Image: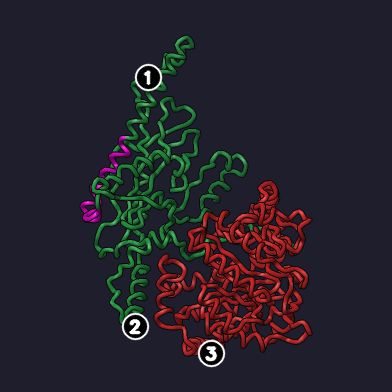
Chain colours: A red, B green
Amino acid sequence: MHLTLHLTSACSMRCGYCYAPPNPGRRMSEETAHQALELGARMSGGSCGIVFFGGEPLLERDLIRSSVAFARDKEKRGEGRWHFKITTNGMLLDEEFLQFANREGILITMSLDGTRAAHDRHRRLPDGAPSHDLLVRRLRLLLRYKPCASVIMVTNPDTAGHVAESVVFLLDQGVRYIVHALNYAGAWREEDLEVLHAEYEKLAELYVAWTAAGRKFYYSPFETKLSSHINCERFRDERCDFARRQLSVDPDGHLYPCVQFPKAGPESRWRMGDVSTGVDAAAQQRLREEWLCEHEPCRRCALESRCFHTCACLNWQATGGIATVCPVLCRHERMLAPIVDRVGEELYRRREPLFMRKHYSTAYPLVSLLEDCLAGLSEAGNREVAASTERTRPLA
Amino acid sequence: MRVEPVDSYDTPAYGTREQELALPETLPGLERRAFIRVIGTAGAALILLDLTGCNDSAPEPQADGKQYVAPIFEHGKGSAAAGCVVVAPPVFTSEEEALEIIKDELAKAGVRFTRTGVELARVKIKPGHEAWAETVAINGQEEYRQAITDSPPRPLRLDLMDPKLRVGVLFVSLSRFFELGGQSSETTVQVYPFKAIAKRVAEHLKGAEKGTYFAVFYDPADGVDRESESALRPMMFNSGDRDAWIKIWEQAKKEAHARSAEQIREQARDFASWLKEQGMLSGVPSPQKGL
């Protein structure tokens, strides 16, 4: 069980595709944040994940500190357990905060859309200036403190042609976990998806080459699609569990079924309780029934069990209905699956050791972590990764 | 752009995790080697840590040349017919019941089936075609033949798996008869040669990778014996005795069902003995010893 705390609706950037444009007036109070932590622990049987979100959560770093301190104090008294994560645009990351994050075991995910050309197309500072150079410096700082930090890379129709080079760019920087998402609400045309298709084909070649070279990395579109076949039912279980597994708390303490819905406001039908009174069970039931009752065209689809069409947030953002499947997503899934399956088949046929370990061994996360800890993810290690990218770059 | 369901999509030719865990090869070895390399780098003395206990995997595969597929343990005739003119129909044992018996019997030997439905990607069996009458009626005999020809082989699915001991079993039941290659008799009487199907499945399993021990059991499909049935038949057609006949008939079915259950249990017992002969259960604590 996770709670996403929208600490503020203000943001230090002005990204063109943001689904919740900044609104400087709303900040979460300390009391609301603490109530949310207590609610999370109650709802999850004592151990709860908290995601600090925004707007830009680092605008409220004092609130983050006080919330973590509140949680740690309660942990000492045996009143629950919490683990924390922050999703940030990275602008306000500094050494002092990263030291704090490391002390407290807070995971950090940073947004960066890849190369300068891809990133600066949409991710702008409030004065309209580009942000890439600044954020690449922040990324390097982040990786120095947190070598396994993940990066969220968003692609729009007009940046589809930059996908492969952006993935290579991020890996060159030393990023090992890339969460790549499309802006499904964008005005995707068939020709944009053809461009994206070609980019995935390039990445398929790179994925095989990098894996064969024993290089560890995580690239979400490929990993999740491989997992959808390799882990079958477990993958199905881990897909969106709308209004239940990951609720959002807006700055005023109202509860919503997922991260996109706080923007609809407390008067909307998406509100499902608040941190002081808890989840409104009737509202939760109503939302889940609405979510579960449709997806009709997908029931007879051969890829149904391997697809993300159940993501309510994404559907709502793109179509206005939580169970009305986004056509772009459908087209994308149909395009991606055969590409990734070819990658899986090739690596499986060769029994590539890293592929077999990464995708089939239950011990891999533990052993890999030990490998990384003992080998040390130093800057020298990052340079080695970058050099490896250079060796495989001609494929892109 | 529209939402367009995909009508068909080939199963990818890379295994699922279940399949990999069922077929031991390099995974435990790979993890162990990776781990030892790390430990070696660190100069630590943790090399004694046995990863086998951490990853739900099995002992290393044994050397080739061993027998991995058990013979068919013949208890019960394993052949039956049902349909139009069959007057003494067999009593089938459900898959669920049979698997409970098998689990129960093998648990006594220390085999613990914690996985179900494991598919063996490399062992494929061409399924039979159940819907003979419907297909022929709608599309004709030629279409029916074509449907059989076009039906692709499918990965074999085990019913139960002990991933630690690497023991997998499969039960040839009525519900899986066609899936496992049973053919339509193409008449209104369907013949179910369960034992013959079990033998054929066992032959296919010999093509699986070494290291997992397999057994194929079958439904004995015991029925009301013919003599009793002949004696009962006059009662059946005499309406005055119909209730008495039903009672006797139901009792006879119960007895047949119990005989089948015992025969399945005997098949499982034989398999446990066979596993011991292969040296697989030596050192496996029996439940009585505290596990």
Percent across and percent down for residue B257 are 37, 30
Q: Are marks 3 and 2 on the same chain?
A: no
* Picture residue at 53% right of the left edge, 85% below the top: A144
Instruction: Give the answer, above or below, for where A127 lies relative to B68.
Output: below
CA distance for labels 1 and 3: 84 Å
Q: Is residue B52 visible?
A: yes
Q: For mark 3, what is the residue?
A: A390
Tags 1 and 3 on a common chain: no
Q: Residue at x 70, y 53 (%)?
A: A272
Where is mark 2, residue-wise?
B41
Query: In the shown orientation, is residue A281 left or right of residue A384?
Result: right
- Closer to the camera in the image, A59 or A199: A59
SS assignment for the magenta stretch, majority: helix
- Circles 1, 2 touching at the beta carbon (< 8 Å): no
With respect to residue B263, does A135 lie above or below?
Answer: below
| Residue labelled with disc 1 | B230
Q: In this orientation, does residue A303 appear?
A: no
Secondary element type, mark 3: helix
At 54% from the left and 83% from the top, the residue drawn is: A143
Circle 1 SS class: helix
Task: Report the amino acid beneath label 1.
Answer: Ser
Query: Mark 3 belongs to which amino acid?
Result: Glu
In which quadrant of the rendered image does the N terminus of chain A lie?
A: bottom right
Please tell me how crowded label 3 is: few (under 14), some (14-19), or many (20+) other residues with Cα within 10 Å.
few
* Mark sitting earlier along the chain (1/2): 2
Q: Nearer the viewer, mark 1 or mark 2?
A: 2
- Does B207 sit left or right of A274 as displayed? left
Q: Is residue A391 above or below residue B118?
A: below
Estimate how packed mark 1 is, as few (under 14), some (14 to 19) or many (20 or more) residues with alpha carbons within 10 Å: few
Q: What amino acid type is highlighted by mark number 2?
A: Thr
Magenta-drawn segment: B262-284
